[in-house]
Structures are given as C-alpha cells and as structure tokens.
Image: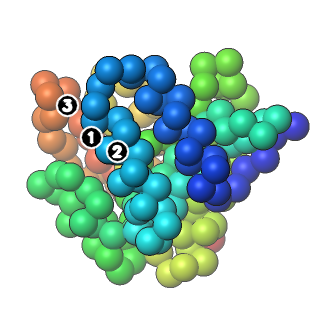
Amino acid sequence: MFEYRKATTEDLERIWDKDIAENAGDPRYPEWKTQFINANKRKKIITFVVVTDGDPVGQATLVLLKDVIDSEIKGILCNDRDTAYISTVRIEKQFEAQGHISKLFKLMEKTAADIGIKYLTIGCEAKMTRNLAIYLHFGYTEYLTSITDDGDLILFFRKALTI
C-alpha cells in the first residue's frame, strides 16, 4: 500500500539519512540535510513523498520562495507570488513506471493551486529524455529557457494550473 502526502520531519530525516549513506564522505550532505529540513519547516519549500511500509521511496519538492534556488534564473522559476518551482523529483528504481510520480504531481499541483500558485515550473537535463517526456506528458510544455550547468544542458518549462 502506498501513501502520497506532504513529508513529515521524520520522512525528511529518513530521506536525507539515505542520501548521506549513499554519499558517505561528502561533507556537503549533512549541511544540505539541515538546510532542506529547515526550509520545509519555514514553509519556503514543501516536500511531498511516496511512502510504503512507513518508508519514503519517492519525493518531489515545491519551491515557493526564490531565495531557496541557487541559479541565475531563479526569478524565472519562482517569483514569490504566483509561480513556484518543482525540484528534486525522485523515485527508487524498483517503484518506477508504476504511476507514483503522476500521483505525487497531482497532489503537488492541487496543493499549489490551493495556496494561490498559478504556474509551476520544472527543469530537466536535455539528455534525460525519459524524464523530459514525462514532464511534457504532465503538461509542462511552455518552454521558458535553458542553461548549462556543469556541462549539462538544462531545459525549463512551465505549466498553468487549471485545478
């Protein structure tokens, strides 16, 4: 049985503890964990999770305030009023292609609309064609811009919420 909901602090702790274990020795991860959990607590971001057997196995984050975004285009992605940015979309490999991300997006979009967000934006590495196809299928079809980050071309799209 799967549950789709806003992440609790315990969910966030578990997610980040997994990331820290997978990236052992990288001192940035514990710092990022603290920043990420604090941003959720301060309602600058809202993380949503897919949970099974009490364990978060998927996530996506809605960035509500542009000061959270570390990019020269943050004002395009999020404007602190009616546009928010979707970040950190992930699902564990064994749960891919089962509709979990679709359900998570529907929950995120409804939550965003309920708090007055009119547009959502998302970015995707151009080489990640499967993810790009999924986002386009979900309605993120208005091309905004692109940037190159660490040698990777990132494409950004927007969707008007009609919920």
Q: Is residue 124 visible?
A: yes
Per the image, label 1 sits on a secondary structure element best described as: strand
- Tell me, yes or no, whether the two marked residues, 1 and 3, touch with CB atoms within 8 Å: yes
Name the residue type under label 1: Leu
Report the residue at 37% width, 39% height from top. Answer: 30
Q: Residue at x 59, y 55 (%)?
A: 9
First reached walking from the N terminus: tag 2 or tag 1: 2
User: Taking 146 as reference, is 115 left or right?
Assistant: right
Label 3 secondary element: strand
Provide the residue designation for mark 1: 155
The residue shown at (52%, 34%) is 17
- Residue 44 position by quadrant: bottom left
Q: Dot 3, crowdedness within 10 Å: few (<14), some or many (≥20)?
A: some
For the residues carrying marks 2 and 1, which lies nearer the camera in this image? 2
Q: Is residue 120 visible?
A: no
Q: Nearer the viewer, residue 83 or 10?
A: 10
Q: Is residue 85 above or below residue 60?
A: below
Q: Earlier in the sequence, mark 2 or mark 3?
A: 2
Looking at the rendered image, the quarter that the C terminus falls into is bottom right
Total marks placed: 3
